[in-house]
Image: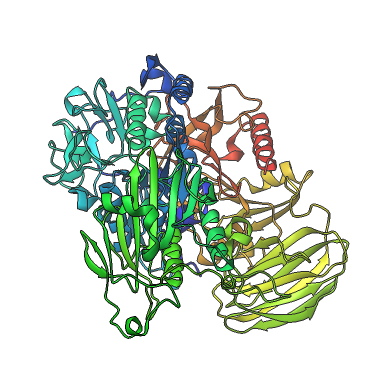
Amino acid sequence: MRKATLYLAVFVLLLLLPVGARYFQYYRPFAPRPAAPPAYSAAGIAAVPTPAAGETSVEVDAVEPVRAGGSADVAAVEATRAAVEATRGIAVLDQAHRNQFTAEELATLDGLLAARGFQVQPVTEGDLAAALRPAGALIVIAPVDDYSAADVRAVSEFVARGGRVLLVGDPTRYHVEFDEEDIFAPPVVETAQTPLNALANPFDITFRGDYLYNTVENEGNFRNILLGEAGLAGGPLTDGLSRLALYSSHSLLLGPSAAPLLSADDNTWSSATDRPGGLTLAALSPPGSDGGQVLALGDVHFLTEPYITVHDNAAFAGRVADFLAGGTRNAGVLAGFPYFYDSPVDLVYSEAPELGPDAFDEIITLQAAFREAGLSLALAGEPAGDHDALYLGLYNQAGDVAELLEVAGVELVITPAISAPGDETDEEAGAPAGTRLIRSALGDVQMAGTALILLGGDEARRQVAVLAASNDGLESAVDRLRAGDLSGCLQQDTLALCPTGVAGEPVEYALDTSGPADAPADPQPEGEPPAGDDDNRPGGEQAPAADVVDQGPIALGETQSAELAADEAHAWTFNGGPATIDIVVDAGQNVDAVLELYAPDDTLVGNVDSTFAGGQEEMRGVEIADDGDYTIVVRDFFNDGGDYELSVTAGETGGGEEAGLNRIFIFADDDGEALTDGFTSAPLLADLLEGDYDVTIWLASDDGPLPDDALQGIDLLIWESGDYRDEGGPVSDDVGVIVDYLNGGGNLFVSGLSPTILGAVDVAPLAAAAVVDGDPTLSRGFEEGQIIEFDATYRVALPNATDVGANEFVFLERAPGEEGEGAVIGIGGVDADNGQRTIFLLAPLAGLPDEARGQLVANIMAWFEAT
């Protein structure tokens, strides 16, 4: 029964085709054509300039400005900048909020920042405040997940400390979320508007949920906005620039503390209001001598190739990098510990107490924290004259930091003086404790139960003093400082008074560290695989469930059935090596299986988690080097439990890594409505491929929906629909099978006049295609611009956009003179994360001349063989 809907088409197109998804999600080339904006006419609009069409300018301090026409000159200028600048810093790149961009798109910005001595540091999870501690800049691009109140506060505090923030929105960057339990429920379109505004609103900036267009003057498309000198505010970011082009930009609303940086002319309209004029595309806030600390931009494209090479975009991108590199590195606040230091750093215990074992675990912990920050920390009796210093001590032994305390306006009040142990007289022993206070701008605070952390010195020499009433209190303060956790403390930028959590803490006379070192927390149970520490695993994979239950041995050629309880993982022992084996977990309906293999020394050999509940997880061609005890761990990703089967069989050497194709599945989707006479190119494809590959053909009209296991072990799925078209999208049964295949890393070749996955799209007559040399393999045997005529005129899907992503390659387009001239016909792409390959061919293969068809198919297969 056909359960086709347009949502299914969008689901497959936007979420499940790793490469095609990016292209179609961002640019929506096959979506129904939008209504034309007021006064818009396609006639006479020029094509978007190629990189050579516009001059770029990148200015470098102490280097002669260079005028160039391409990115190679930009790179040369930036290399020169690297030689004349010695700035060291970190720019945090937010990737923890499902940000809608790829690393490849930001390669140019990454290079610009590297040339300025800044390292881009992606953050994919965790505490944003902690990530910002070493940073001078924060980059946030098109997030779709919300920010917590703590994240918003961390960004505001980061800006207050001198950090720079770049906030970038883009109307073409969004995510479509579907109800997995009800596939026919309306999709939810998640945009960056709400998450971005959570960060931008405290600085009087609001991203509007619109896009801008100009039908009078634009860069080849009415959504590509041109900005002249009148639209460029003065200041370091725009001085000397004359023309910029922004692509698919939002507009911004500004409050009193924000200032416009880029403004559109009176012929630019907003899709939100359908009114022209008064639109801001970029802004700065809050005001300052250098213009501001927060830069908000409505478009991301101008930072990427090839758009950066148009007009003055490259120069502007360089100015954006200058802006980010101008942020301070938490140099004057405690939150930046230990990153405000410069190596070497001396660790000094105030008044040189005799150190015992209980001190050395703290010393080792601190040294590890400093190493993570690229710094060295060494124990010293007193700091060298040119070294930074970290002082540890008690309030009653703070002579070494007396000057530091005095400069900060901190007074330690201890009256009467504390006597050494054994020196008290009977009268003193019965006397009241007296006054034990910390006096500062934060008020008078009792020493007992409180630790003091103070940052002093200057840019040339940083000094930090950590004082407490007792050894236990000092350990608590060191742990806080190392973790960067000043929550619950009374604090200013350079002073924090923090609770130690030590009940009944005494104000001790002297530091006593003669006791044993602290025991390590949570030792690893003997004989179990390492658990709970992501750092022990490549890539930081999720650790196994806490309760690992031994299931005994499993032998070569054996299959074992078992059932996981909730919050339980199973450990099987294999000692049949040396051998090459395949390990397969066939999960029950409710189990999202995770498969892991550990060597005899408990190091992780490999793990897989490529399917959803009910799928198979496979490790193939695993080399077992010896006859030791290898541990196979099976668990449920959600720890809900359920049944599964585990099998270990003989495998082929390198079976899990072998490149190329062997088994090909052709799904002839021929049960829709025919646009012409009703045909597919599946028989021709089979004839061309069967001599070299193991080919299976499945006819939807005769064979019905795809079985659940139809695509298991398939190296390439060819989804060929010929001239058949289903305006509602693919059958849901087929979708589930194809989804599982793609989630397992399968390659996909979609071919047809109007492929089923696109649903209802515009079509236009097509009689000829032109070759584009976008990839040397896909264009092999053809010449750039070569015209290939079909045997008839066909009605073929017509894209309404021409943008191509960084990892995508156009190899065929509509020939000159055709309706939609230059629109994509053939496009391929490679997923940057897993190397998965996808090709869309919007044309009848059967309608091509024999020689051209054979060459094209050979090229496509060679391209897929590169996996």
Image spot of residue 389 (x, y percent): 44, 48
Q: Is residue 518 above or below residue 856?
A: below
Q: Where, by quadrant of the figure, is residue 626 drawn?
A: bottom right
Q: Where, by quadrant of the figure, is residue 709 drawn?
A: bottom right
Q: Can residue 495 be seen in the rendering of this structure? A: yes
Taking depth in this image into account, of 77 and 489 the one nearest to the observer is: 489
Image spot of residue 689 (x, y percent): 73, 44
Q: Residue at x 32, y 86 (%)?
A: 430
Q: Is residue 163 left or right of residue 770?
A: left
Image spot of residue 778 (x, y percent): 62, 33
Q: Can residue 674 be seen in the rendering of this structure? A: no
Colouring? rainbow
Taking depth in this image into account, of 230 and 721 the one nearest to the observer is: 230
Q: Where, by quadrant of the figure, is residue 276 drawn?
A: top left
Q: What count of labels does the image hold?
A: 0
Quadrant housing the C terminus: top right
Q: Is residue 809 above or below residue 681?
A: above
Q: Is residue 648 above or below residue 672?
A: below
Q: Is residue 454 left or right of residue 778?
A: left
Image spot of residue 750 (x, y percent): 56, 47
Taking depth in this image into account, of 862 and 509 the one nearest to the observer is: 509
